[in-house]
Amino acid sequence: MNLIIDIASYICFFIGAFALITGSLGILRLPDVYSRIHAAGIIDTAAVGFIILGMMLQSGFSLTSAKLALIVLFLFFTSPISGHAVAMMANKFGIKPEAKEIKPKNKNAGDLNG
Amino acid sequence: MFNVNLGVVNMSHRIYLIFSENKKMEKKAIKKTRNINKLSALAYTGLMVLLWVVLSGHFTPLLLSFGALSCLFVIYMAWRGDVLMGDIKPEQFFLKVPFYWIWLALEILKSNISTGKAIWTNNFEPEIFEVKASQNSENGLANYANSITLTPGTVTVLIKGNIFLVHALTAEMGKDVRSGVMDKKITKMAL
Amino acid sequence: MFALVLLVCAICIVMLIARAAKGPTAFDRILAVNCIGTVIILGISLHGFALGRPEFVDISILYAVLNFLGTLAILRFYRKSDVSDEDL
């Protein structure tokens, strides 16, 4: 039983470390701020989630697990807020995204620039 | 140097104003607190007690009573300052939101895989578009915007009323957001 | 195993510092520093587990709170004059 839990947590660590490398590589590689926020999102969700899941499996059913769950909950609530804040301020300071603009087909959506 | 001094003077003047106007504001604040949802106050107290127990980890009567006292003090301050939001419905929250979170976790996993693929193969075409949210409460709108940003691959850049400006990493993810599956799910929760 | 994951964290922090140093705009730097904070949260708890003292988790909760508040504070008190013409 112990061995199974160990193997499961090691698999979680492996996936989390891979996500960590993917996210940092994305932050290095992607072209502009708005795209880099997506890479930061990988670190904030997949890497944190899987590595902390691995640690929770290691510590078993205890107070430490509850604290780790609290960290995950807190990060999942706050990371989109900081990502959105960075994107919003970048937009406010006039940094243009290198992106294709898609106009809405129906006229329901008004334009934000007006 | 002069600038710094001016700033300090300005700040102290503002603080003085806050304190001197306090007496007048007090009566208004007390009148406002009547339409507070009692259930949400109870839910907040429960959450704070849970947080105290988890973070302290001690179960002696002395420390538990300190915890209860500080929780009551905080909820009293929030009640008096009228920052307890009356529009949150805890019964709705605990019945429906956990199921939504499970669905959201699966969605996050899927979009993580596709974003990782896009990064490793260096194959992405960012697009930016507007999306209309169909929620009519502020909580629902905040929930939708946060859910879009939390899934890697899509970021809410700007919010104006109920129209979001969304940046997506690949065309596929943009199509996912525009199809409005998440929007309908959150509207159905009626937060 | 914990040591290996810590090594990966260190490599990632080096990559993120490269972005924070290079970043063409100030927002890239803020984003990179925010991510370094997230990786350090993981690093603190992993370090505690590697030493057999899981109490370090408390410190990482505190670090998560400070990281979030710091990012928002920097963005909040940002003005147009703080971004030089070269940056944009």
Image: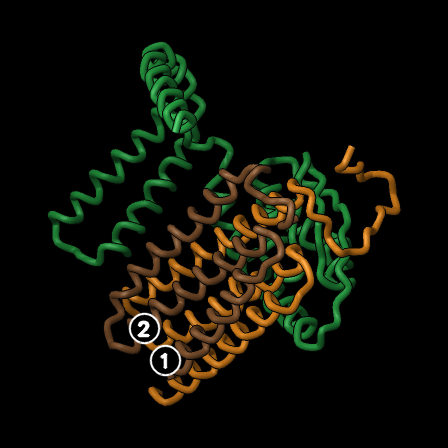
Q: Residue at x 66, y 55 (%)?
A: A34
Q: Quadrant of residue B142?
A: top right
Left or right, residue A108 beside residue C30: right
Left or right, residue B2 beside residue A93: left
- The local secondary structure at tag 2 comes to helix
Q: For chain A, what colour was chosen?
A: orange
Q: Which chain is green?
A: B
User: Of B35 and A104, which appears nearest the observer?
Assistant: A104
Q: Which residue is mark 1?
A: C2
Q: Residue at x 84, y 46 (%)?
A: A104
Q: Is residue A26 above or below residue B144?
A: below
**Colour setting:** by chain
Specify whether residue B96 is in view. Answer: no
Q: Quadrant of residue B120?
A: bottom right
Q: For chain C, what colour was chosen?
A: brown
Does the CB distance between marks 2 and 1 fall below 8 Å?
A: yes
- The local secondary structure at tag 1 comes to helix
Chain letter behind tag 1 = C
Q: Quadrant of the N terminus of chain A?
A: bottom left
Task: Give the amino acid type for the residue marked by disc 2 in the picture.
Answer: His
Left or right, residue B20 beside residue C22: left
Q: Residue at x 46, y 69 (%)?
A: C13
Q: Position of residue B162 (x, y in %)?
A: 69, 37
User: Of B156 and B48, which appears nearest the observer?
Assistant: B156
Q: Is residue A109 above or below residue C51?
A: above
- All told, the count of numbered labels is 2
